[in-house]
C-alpha cells in the first residue's frame, strides 16, 4: 500500500511538473510574440487602407501625370483597358466628373494586379491635392469622388513691415496665401497699397495638411495690425450662422456693397465666359452684367472708394473704374457722361451718382455694363459673396465679449519680431 501511495504521489508531481513546464513555454512564447520585432512578417504586416480609402497592399502602384491634350480614354487605353470597357467607364464617370476637363499636369494612379497581365484594378485621378475620383474596376464599374483626410495645425506669424505685407510674410517663411487672407480681412480698415515702414502685425491661423504636405491656409483665428500708429483687431465670431470678423467693439470689419448700381433697370445680359457679342457677332467672354435703362439714368457707385480711371476706351466707351480697397474694384461702362467732379483721384461714397447711362463704345442700345473684380480677377457681380456688415447683436454681446477676451490674450502672447532674412 505504501509503495502504491508513493507511486501515486510521484505521478501527480510528474503531471504537475509537466503542466508547469508547458505553461512556462506558453508564457515565454507569448512574451516573445509581444515583441513586435519577433512577430512573423506575414502577421505584422496587416493590410492597411491607403490614402484613397481602399486596400492596395497586394497591388502594383504607379503614379503618372496627365500629358498635354491627353484624355481619360487615352490614359485608360495606355493602361491596357479594352476599348469596349473604356466606353462604359467614361459613360459611368459622367455623373461624377466632366471627363473633358482632365487637367494637364494633374496626377493619376494606376493600381494593377501583380502578374503578367497587369490588369487595372483601381484608377485614381487627383482633381486637387485633396479631392480625387476613384474608378473601381474590380467586378462592376464603380466611379465615385472622395477627399483625403485634412490635418489642421495651428501656426502664428508676426513681423514689422519693411517693404510690403507680402515681402514681410515671405521673410517669415509664410505662404503668399496668408497675405491675401489678411488683406481681405482688413480690406476696409487698411490701405495695403500704402503701408508704412514700421507698421506691424500678428496673426494666429490654421494650416491644412494633406498626406503630411501643406495644402492651404485654413481659418484666421486671430489677427492684429498696427497701421500708421492705430491698432486694428480681427476677432472671429459666428452670427446668424455666418463666420465673420469684428473689431474689439463688436463692429463688423466688412462694409456691404449695393446690390446694383442703378435704382431702376432690368438685366439684359448676364456674366458669361462665352457670349455672342451683339455687335461683333463673335463669341467672347462678357465679364459683367448689363442693365438696360434709358439714356441719362443715374449710375451710382456700389461702395466707397477712389476713382482710379475715368475716360474713353474703344469698345467700353466712356467708363469709370473705382478701387474700393486693396481687394475690391468695380467698373461702369458705356456711360453717356460723367457726374460733376468725377475724375481720376476723386473719392466717392456708396450710393453717390458718378455718371449716367449711355450707349458709347460697342453698344446696340442704352445700357450700363457693370463689372466687379476681386484681387484683380473678374467675378459675377450677382454671385459675389460679401458677408453682412451688421455689428454683433445685443443678445449675443456677452458671448462675443468672452470670445474677444480669449482672442486678445492669445494675441498678447505673440511677440512681434523683426525680419531676420530681408529679401
Image (spheres, rainbow, N blue to C red):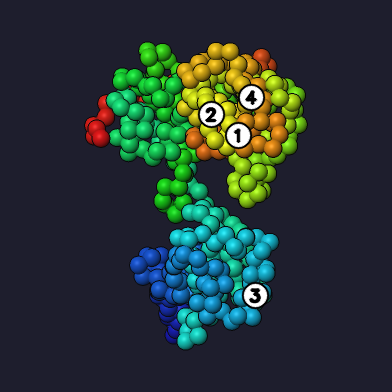
Determine which quarter of the picture holds residue 270. top right
**Which marked residue is nearer to the observer: mark 2 or mark 3?**
2
- For residue 401, what is the image quadrant? top right
**Callout 2–callout 3 Cβ contact below 8 Å:** no
How far across and how far down the image is residue 181, in percent? 47, 33
**Residue 183 in view here:** yes
Earlier residue among tags 2 and 3: 3
**Of pointers 3 and 1, the one earlier in the residue sequence:** 3
Front-most of residues 135 and 31? 135
Of callouts 4 and 3, the N-terminal one: 3
From the image, tell me which residue sits under label 1.
361
Residue 157, placed above or below residue 69: above
Label 3 to label 1, Cα distance in Å?
49 Å
**Mark seen at residue 87:** 3
Is 285 left, or right, of 406 in this rendering?
Answer: right
**Separation of marks 4 and 3 at Cα, in angstroms:** 56 Å
In the picture of the structure, the residue carrying the numbered disc 4 is 336
Q: Nearer the viewer, mark 4 or mark 3?
A: 4
Spatial CA span between label 2 and label 4: 11 Å
Instruction: Give percent across and percent down for residue 167.
Output: 32, 33
Q: Is residue 405 visible?
A: no
Label 4's element?
strand
Position of residue 387 measured from the top left corner of the image (x, y, whole percent): 62, 28
Q: Residues within 10 Å of mark 2 (few under 14, many from 20)?
A: some
Image quarter in which the C terminus is found: top left
Q: Secondary structure at mark 3?
A: helix
- Please give the label number shown on residue 312: 2
Image: 11 above or below 414: below
Amino acid at each position: 500500500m505504501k509503495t502504491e501511495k508513493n507511486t501515486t504521489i510521484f505521478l501527480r508531481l510528474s503531471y504537475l511538473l509537466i503542466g508547469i513546464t508547458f505553461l512556462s513555454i506558453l508564457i515565454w512564447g507569448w512574451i516573445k510574440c509581444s515583441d513586435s520585432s519577433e512577430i512573423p512578417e506575414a502577421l505584422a504586416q496587416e493590410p492597411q487602407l491607403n490614402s484613397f480609402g481602399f486596400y492596395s497592399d497586394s497591388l502594383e502602384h504607379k503614379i503618372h501625370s496627365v500629358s498635354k491634350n491627353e484624355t481619360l480614354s487615352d490614359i485608360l487605353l495606355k493602361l491596357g483597358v479594352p476599348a469596349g470597357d473604356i466606353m462604359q467607364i467614361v459613360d459611368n464617370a459622367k455623373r461624377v466628373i466632366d471627363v473633358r476637363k482632365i487637367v494637364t499636369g494633374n496626377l493619376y494612379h494606376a493600381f494593377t494586379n501583380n502578374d503578367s497581365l497587369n490588369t487595372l484594378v483601381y484608377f485614381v485621378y487627383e482633381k486637387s491635392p485633396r479631392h480625387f475620383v476613384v474608378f473601381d474596376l474590380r467586378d462592376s464599374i464603380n466611379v465615385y469622388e472622395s477627399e483625403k483626410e485634412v490635418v489642421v495645425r495651428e501656426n502664428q506669424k508676426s513681423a514689422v513691415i519693411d517693404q510690403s505685407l507680402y515681402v514681410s510674410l515671405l521673410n517669415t517663411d509664410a505662404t503668399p496665401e496668408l497675405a491675401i487672407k489678411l488683406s481681405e480681412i482688413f480690406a476696409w480698415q487698411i490701405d495695403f497699397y500704402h503701408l508704412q515702414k514700421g507698421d506691424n502685425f500678428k496673426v494666429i491661423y490654421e494650416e491644412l495638411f494633406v498626406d503630411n504636405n501643406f495644402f492651404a491656409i485654413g481659418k484666421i483665428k486671430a489677427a492684429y495690425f498696427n497701421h500708421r500708429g492705430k491698432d486694428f483687431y480681427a476677432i472671429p465670431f459666428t452670427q446668424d450662422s455666418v463666420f465673420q470678423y469684428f473689431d474689439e467693439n463688436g463692429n463688423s470689419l466688412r462694409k456691404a456693397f449695393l446690390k446694383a448700381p442703378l435704382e431702376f433697370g432690368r438685366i439684359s445680359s448676364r456674366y458669361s465666359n462665352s457670349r455672342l457679342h451683339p455687335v461683333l457677332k463673335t463669341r467672347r467672354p462678357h465679364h459683367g452684367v448689363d442693365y438696360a435703362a434709358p439714356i441719362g439714368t443715374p449710375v451710382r457707385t456700389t461702395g466707397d472708394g477712389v476713382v482710379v480711371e475715368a475716360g474713353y476706351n474703344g469698345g467700353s466707351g466712356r467708363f469709370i473704374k473705382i478701387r474700393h480697397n486693396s481687394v475690391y474694384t468695380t467698373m461702369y461702362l458705356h456711360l453717356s457722361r460723367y457726374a460733376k467732379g468725377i475724375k481720376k483721384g476723386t473719392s466717392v461714397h456708396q450710393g453717390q451718382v458718378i455718371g449716367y447711362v449711355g450707349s458709347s463704345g460697342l453698344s446696340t442700345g442704352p445700357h450700363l455694363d457693370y463689372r466687379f473684380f476681386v484681387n484683380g480677377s473678374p467675378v459675377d457681380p450677382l454671385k459675389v459673396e460679401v458677408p453682412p456688415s451688421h455689428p454683433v447683436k445685443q443678445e449675443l454681446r456677452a458671448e462675443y465679449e468672452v470670445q474677444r477676451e480669449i482672442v486678445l490674450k492669445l494675441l498678447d502672447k505673440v511677440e512681434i519680431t523683426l525680419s531676420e532674412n530681408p529679401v
